[in-house]
């Protein structure tokens, strides 16, 4: 809970795939009740055990829901976060009775598991893009309850990262930009797609960076002029979205750069690396 004063010492909600209560929280507090009515969830009747490892979790539909990818399935969970003033921060999860319940489960046929997915949280869209271990991409419509699009061989290897363009309240980028998304894979390619014409293939491909071992997060700038990704040559690469040319190679890390993120207000970019550091770059650092 980032709105609480002081450092949080316990989660507001605990998703679990085991048929027993979660372990005691820090500070000795333990959620009351059995697994049928645990404060950490909605109970086994509403929330069957997860099918395996949770590979990714994300907010969805203006944070009203949570999406979890387990095995070859996507779970859509309705969140019910109660408000209150607990006596002690470490015990807040038990008395506030936060809940979640499984609203829908989408089994994806074909791949052994979902490698990653992307769904809008800052604006209302029923769509989720899911990547499978069989190198496929699928566009799922939760509202219509059907698969809108399937791309069988999106990359030469399985997709390890997906990024939707969500824009920024501080940018005048056109709303049509919300149809764009990025995919990256261990084939060394970063691909830009347009949902309106994705069947024809990627509209842009960026290849100057190195990506053969580690999953690399990607980002589209709020102004819709640049795309960025990490690289295993210890740099972050900033590309011109339209021309595919490298605008800047950002240096300073001593190991592979695996995550990048644009500031929604200022012309700044943050990068994270396997060297254990996070670096912040401004437009003055480009070059």
Image (cartoon, rainbow, N blue to C red):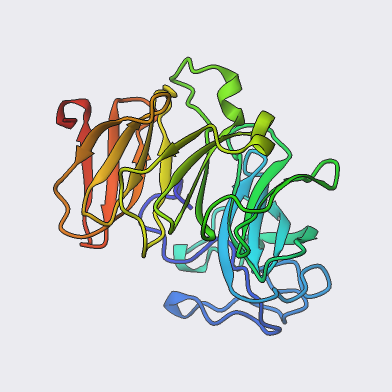
User: Would residue 171 be found to the left or right of residue 115 on screen?
Assistant: left
Q: Residue at x 51, y 60 (%)?
A: 157
Using the image as rendered, state which of residue 183 and residue 11 is in the foreground.
Answer: 183
Q: Residue 48 is drawn in which quadrant?
A: bottom right
User: For residue 186, what is the image quadrant?
Assistant: bottom left
User: Is residue 92 in view from this perspective?
Assistant: yes
Left or right position of 48 against 56 = right
Residue occupying the point 22% across, 48% down = 235
Q: Examine the rendering and report whether any part of residue 82 can be seen.
A: no
Q: Position of residue 154 (x, y in %)?
A: 59, 50
Comparing 176 with 78, the one in front is 176
Towards the viewer: 261 or 122: 261
Quadrant for the C terminus, please.
top left
> On screen, 245 above or below 63?
above
Residue 248 to residue 155: above or below: above
Q: Is residue 221 above or below residue 160?
A: above
Q: Position of residue 119 (x, y in %)?
A: 62, 44
Residue drawn 44% across the image and 19% down it: 171
Q: Provide residue 142's location: percent of width, then percent of height.
A: 78, 45
Q: Is residue 124 above or below residue 254?
A: above
Q: Residue 200: x and y, percent?
A: 65, 35
């Amino acid at each position: 809970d980032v709105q609480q004063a002081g450092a949080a010492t316990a989660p507001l909600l605990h998703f679990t795939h085991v048929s027993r209560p979660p372990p005691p929280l820090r500070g000795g507090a333990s959620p009351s009740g059995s697994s049928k009515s645990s404060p950490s969830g909605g109970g086994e009747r509403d929330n069957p055990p997860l099918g395996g490892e949770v590979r990714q979790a994300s907010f969805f539909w203006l944070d009203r829901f949570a999406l979890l990818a387990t095995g070859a399935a996507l779970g859509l969970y309705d969140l019910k976060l109660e408000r209150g003033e607990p006596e002690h921060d470490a015990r807040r999860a038990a008395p506030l009775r936060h809940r979640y319940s499984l609203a829908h489960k989408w089994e994806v046929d074909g791949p052994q598991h979902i490698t990653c997915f992307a769904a809008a949280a800052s604006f209302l869209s029923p769509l989720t893009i899911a990547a499978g271990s069989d190198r496929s991409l699928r566009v799922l419509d939760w509202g219509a309850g059907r698969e809108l699009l399937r791309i069988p061989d999106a990359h030469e290897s399985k997709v390890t990262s997906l990024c939707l363009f969500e824009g920024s309240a501080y940018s005048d980028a056109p709303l049509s930009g919300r149809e764009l998304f990025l995919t990256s894979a261990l084939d060394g390619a970063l691909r830009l797609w347009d949902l309106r014409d994705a069947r024809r293939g990627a509209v842009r491909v960026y290849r100057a960076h190195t990506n053969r071992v580690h999953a690399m997060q990607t980002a589209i700038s709020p102004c819709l002029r640049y795309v960025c990704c990490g690289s295993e040559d210890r740099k972050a690469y900033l590309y011109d979205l339209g021309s595919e040319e490298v605008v800047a190679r950002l240096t300073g890390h001593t190991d592979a750069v695996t995550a990048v993120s644009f500031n929604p207000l200022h012309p700044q970019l943050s990068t994270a690396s396997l060297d254990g550091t996070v670096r912040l770059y401004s437009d003055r650092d480009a070059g």
